[in-house]
Image: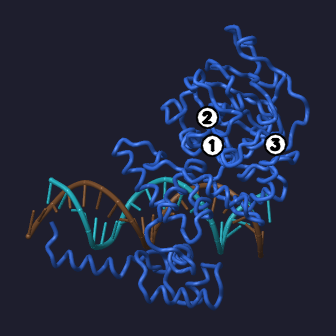
Chain colours: A blue, B brown, C cyan
DNA sequence: AACTTCGACAACCGCACGTCT
DNA sequence: AAGACGTGCGGTTGTCGAAGT
């Protein structure tokens, strides 16, 4: 135990900061005077070229330290203070989709820095792990006000930026719940006209995302994050539950643009590990998406007819109707999650999606009681987990 | 009162990547 | 082509006050 005098002297050393490096660059907490110098420097010379700060301003800080200080504390329009509940909710959802991509998450939270979000998440993670709570589930049910935001969406005459809390599927659910007409073309047209996803600066609306021949993914092409199913179940809320399944191993996607040929059964190795229930109520069942994400591959038969206890290659075809096609188109904009007990190895195609959706809004697709028990056990089940990103 | 734990925040470090020379 | 340099990102550690024991 150090005597008080010694402790105080160490404290004063800390307050001054440590020094390191050949040129005795200062480390540790920034002082107000240093901040003022850095602000003045950026005012004069603009951002960037951080290593020049020390040369030109006499500030004894390395470029990295200057950049960090500016980005996290000094730059204008920074939001300070605790995260709002809306921001917290968004962080949870973004993390479910992106993983530890703090900078990309920060891009969706104006005025917030990656460091802030990272700190928040790590603290939250620790707290919840200690409490034995799920990482992603929130205390309150989300999307409870979907209809309201949808109305705002549709009544707007200009494109609206929507964040990841409006996934294609949740939007679909919103659209259906507010306008339960059988035809989905109007929904899609509405989405195209009013919706603008923003991620990686991709404006999907420009490319008519749900009808173009190549649907852009809302992620950079070289890194496709995989969200957890926990997220899916949570985000889609009570109206639509879905599972999206792909390989248990990271899969190399040859190219999003590749393969316009018709697939054959040899293009896939599929080992179904689930039993198919009564699908009479299913808005969409499950199947393989084609390479372009336009439609499910339908030249396979049902597992009842096809598998017969063998590992016969093939794919399940569900009930396909116009809604399914639209739904799958929507799903094409949604990244994949993983069910480890299934083995699906796409060879040629962009990705494989199995999907089961149950829509209990409107009149046309109301589920029947007999199908209420059909459940793939996706709601927070421990058999689901998040896979690392695909590169 | 002393100590520990916790949480929020700040800062550092190593690495990767792109650009420039 | 290769190395230097600048920058950004994510992991990790440090700091400090509040709360708990």
Instruction: Look at discs 3 and 1 and give the one toward the viewer.
Output: 1
Circles 2 and 1, Cβ within 8 Å, touching? The answer is yes
Q: Is residue A224 left or right of residue A84?
A: right
User: In whole angstroms, how far apart are the C-alphas of marks 3 and 1?
Assistant: 17 Å
Furthest residue to the right? A261
Which residue is more in the foreground, A193 or A91? A193
The residue where tag 1 is placed is A226
- The earlier-in-sequence mark between 2 and 1 is 1
Image mark 1: chain: A
Q: Both on one chain, marks 3 and 2? A: yes
Residue A77 visible in image: yes
Instruction: Locate residue A233, reporting x and y percent.
Output: 56, 39
Residue A334 visible in image: no
User: In whole angstroms, how far apart are the C-alphas of marks 2 and 1?
Assistant: 8 Å
Q: Which structural element holds mark 2?
A: loop
- The earlier-in-sequence mark between 3 and 1 is 1
Q: Both on one chain, marks 3 and 1? A: yes
Instruction: Locate residue A332, reporting x and y percent.
Output: 75, 42
Instruction: Locate residue A353, reporting x and y percent.
Output: 71, 33
Instruction: Locate residue B4, reporting x and y percent.
Output: 20, 56
Label 2 neighbour load within 10 Å: few <14, some 14-19, many 20+: many
Label placed on residue A166: none
- The earlier-in-sequence mark between 3 and 2 is 3
Label placed on residue A255: 3
Label 3 neighbour load within 10 Å: few <14, some 14-19, many 20+: few
């Amino acid at each position: 135990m150090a005597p008080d005098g010694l402790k105080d002297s160490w404290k004063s050393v800390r307050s001054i900061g440590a020094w390191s490096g050949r040129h005795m660059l200062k480390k540790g907490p920034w002082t107000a005077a240093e901040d003022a110098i850095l602000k003045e420097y950026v005012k004069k010379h603009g951002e960037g070229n951080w290593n020049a700060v020390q040369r030109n301003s006499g500030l004894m800080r390395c470029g990295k330290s200057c950049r960090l200080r500016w980005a996290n504390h000094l730059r204008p329009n920074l939001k300070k203070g605790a995260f709002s509940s809306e921001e917290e909710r968004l962080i949870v959802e973004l993390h479910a989709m992106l993983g530890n991509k703090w900078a990309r998450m920060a891009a969706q939270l104006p005025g917030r820095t990656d460091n802030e979000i990272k700190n928040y998440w790590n603290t939250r993670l620790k707290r919840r792990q200690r409490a034995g709570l799920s990482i992603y589930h929130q205390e309150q049910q989300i999307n409870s006000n979907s209809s309201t935001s949808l109305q705002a969406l549709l009544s707007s005459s200009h494109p609206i930026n929507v964040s990841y809390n409006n996934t294609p599927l949740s939007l679909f659910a919103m659209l259906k719940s507010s306008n339960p007409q059988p035809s989905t073309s109007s929904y899609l047209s509405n989405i195209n006209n009013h919706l603008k996803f923003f991620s990686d600066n991709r404006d999907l609306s420009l490319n008519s995302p749900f009808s173009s021949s190549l649907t852009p993914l809302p992620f950079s092409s070289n890194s496709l994050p995989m969200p957890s199913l926990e997220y899916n179940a949570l985000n889609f809320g009570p109206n639509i539950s879905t599972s999206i399944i792909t390989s248990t191993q990271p899969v190399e996607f040859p190219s999003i643009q590749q393969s316009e040929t018709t697939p054959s059964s040899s293009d896939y190795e599929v080992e179904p590990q689930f039993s198919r229930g009564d699908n009479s109520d299913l808005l969409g069942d499950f199947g393989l998406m084609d390479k372009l994400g336009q439609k499910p591959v339908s030249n396979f038969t049902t597992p009842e007819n096809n598998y017969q206890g063998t590992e016969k290659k093939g794919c399940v075809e569900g009930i396909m109707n116009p809604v399914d096609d639209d739904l799958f188109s929507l799903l094409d904009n949604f990244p994949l999650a993983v069910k480890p007990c299934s083995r699906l190895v796409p060879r040629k195609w962009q990705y494989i999606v199995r999907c089961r959706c149950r829509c209990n809004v409107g009149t046309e697709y109301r589920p029947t009681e007999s199908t209420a028990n059909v459940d793939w056990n996706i709601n927070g089940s421990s058999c689901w987990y998040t896979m690392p990103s695909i590169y």
